[in-house]
Amino acid sequence: MKTIDISGMGGGYEATCQKALLNGMRFIKEHPDADYLGSYKVYQNIYGVLTSETQIAHELDKALSAGIPERLGLTGGMHQAVISHLLYIAKQGYEKWLAEFDKDPNRVYEIEEENIDKLLMIEAIEWDLKLESGYDPLEELRKAVPEENWIIFDTANPEPALNELKKRLGAREEDKNDN
C-alpha cells in the first residue's frame, strides 16, 4: 500500500499510526455515505485531545484500534493525526490525499499491512521485555515531571482536564505579560 509518514517518528509509533489509518480507511470504505461533519470536537491550541461527538465518530474511533496491541494503544496525538488524515480521505479521496504529499518524497512510501503487523508485534515484545526487566514508565515520568504538574483525566470526559490546562496556560500568559 502506498501511504505517507504520519508521525515523523518511525518505528512502532509510526506503525501504530499506519495500522489505525488502514483500519480507518476500511471503515470509511464500508460507510461510504457517512457524514463526518461535526463528528469531532477540536480544542484550539491543544493537540492530542479530540472528542468524538457523533455515533459515526464513536464507531470510527473503535475501528481504529483493531489489531493494535492494547498495551501499545493510540496516543491522543496519534488519534488526532490519523483522524485528520482520514477525514481528508473521506472527503477528497485516497488519490488526492497521496497527491498532497507527493511534493515531499521523504513522506511517501510503500508498506504492506503484514509488515505493519510485524512491526507492532516487535514493538509489543520490546515493551513487554522492558516491563519484565523492571522498567517503570511512571517512575520515569516522575523523574522528569513533578506530580503537581500532571493532569490526569478520563478520556471519555476531557473537559475538566481541558479547563485545568487552559487555566494553567492562562497563568503562563499572564506571567509573560507581567515581564
Image: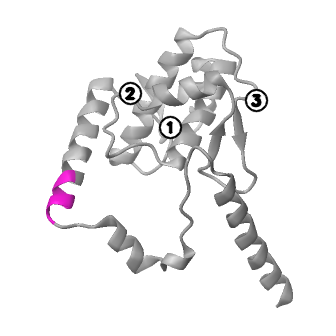
Q: CA distance from mark 1 to mark 2?
A: 29 Å
Find disc 2 in the rendering and name its residue: 66
Q: CA distance from mark 2 to mark 3?
A: 24 Å
Q: Could you tell me if residue 30 is visible in this image?
A: yes
Residue 138 image position (x, y, % from top left): 36, 68
Q: Quadrant of residue 85?
A: top right
Mark closer to the observer (3, 1):
3
**Looking at the image, which residue is at 69% across and 66% down?**
164
Q: Secondary structure at mark 1?
A: loop
Query: Are dots 1 and 2 in contact, CB under 8 Å?
Result: no
Q: Is residue 38 above or below residue 130?
A: above
Left or right of 3? Residue 153 is right
How many badges with numbers are in the image? 3
Q: Which residue type carries mark 2?
A: Ala
For label 1, the crowd category at 10 Å Cα-Cα, with few meaning under 14, some 14 to 19 and many 20 or more, is few
Q: Is residue 165 above or below residue 7?
A: below
Q: Quadrant of residue 31?
A: top right
Q: Secondary structure at mark 2?
A: loop
Find disc 1 in the rendering and name its residue: 105
Q: Is residue 129 magenta?
A: yes
